[in-house]
Amino acid sequence: QSVLTQPPSASGTPGQRVTISCSGSSSNIGSNTVNWYQQLPGTAPKLLIYSNNQRPSGVPDRFSGSKSGTSASLAISGLQSEDEADYYCAAWDDSLNALYVFGTGTKVTVL
Amino acid sequence: EVQLVQSGAEVKKPGESLRISCKGSGYSFTSYWISWVRQMPGKGLEWMGRIDPSDSYTNYSPSFQGHVTISADKSISTAYLQWSSLKASDTAMYYCARHGSGSFGYWGQGTLVTVSS
């Protein structure tokens, strides 16, 4: 089961700013970097943010990430219809033999 | 271009064995770990385990340890996920993903496994 907690849903109208939170613990977010993945309907996940706030080549700068203590957040500014997707945070966890843990996932709806 | 190409969808009966594959291309296969991720119908992502293709060292999530086996054949740049006895609860989409910078920057297209009597 997931050890990183996210809100199940978030929504906004086109152009708005939406933020998604991700809460963990000292063994994962508190001691490792956070990654974010976007999963469009019926497709494989895609890396959106790595190392807390770095965007891979090709990811629009509308997406930004931050981390503080044992929590992290993803912000989507200037929301667009194509941003409607599931978003997952993730981090390595040092508690047991280096596990990778995903968040519970957040469904973003563009109203 | 980095690509991970997975084997096709499978339909199996409970108790049967199965091995699915993930072939890497466009990069040095032995330089990057490969992980497997499960997504049950309508559910979130779950990390199953990973393998270092250079020496086949593996580590597993406790949730999957003993239920699946991850392996690799570096001579053909392919990683595998296998079950010796499938259960209906193994019905899911399975993704392979390549490590890099502490994250999974490249993903396979997914393999749908359906286990039904």
Image (tube, helix red, strand yellow):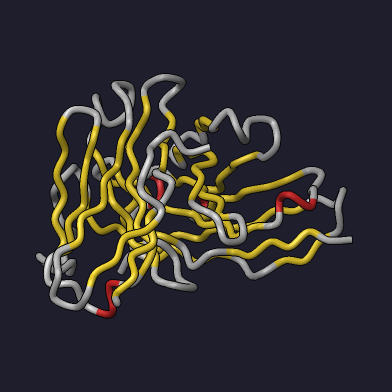
Q: Nearer the viewer, residue B8 or B15?
A: B15
A102 left or right, relative to B72: left
Give residue B64's quadrant in the image.
Answer: top right
- Indicate the position of residue B59 as horizontal and vertical percent values: 51, 30
Q: Position of residue B8 (x, y in %)?
A: 64, 70
Residue ID at (45%, 22%): A97
Describe residue A15's horizontal placement relative to residue B74 as left or right.
Answer: left
* Numbered circles on residues, count: 0
Depth order, front residue of A108/B54: A108
State whether residue B97 is above or below residue A11.
above
Outermost residue, left direction? A61
Q: Does residue B7 lie above or below A111 as drawn?
A: above
Horizontal side of residue B1 vs B30, given as left or right: left
Is B14 placed left or right of B3 in the picture? right
Point 46% across, 20% down: residue = A96
> Where in the figure is residue B101, as x and y percent of width and height?
24, 43
Q: In which quarter of the image is the C terminus of chain B?
A: bottom right
Whether residue B31 is visible: no
Q: Position of residue B83 (x, y in %)?
A: 73, 45
Is any part of residue B86 visible from this angle?
yes
Instruction: Establish if A87 lies above or below B89.
Output: below
Quarter of the image containing the N terminus of chain B? bottom left
Q: Give A93 or A73, whichever is nearer the viewer.
A: A73
Q: Which residue sits at x=24%, y=69%?
A: A12
Residue A14: quarter of image: bottom left
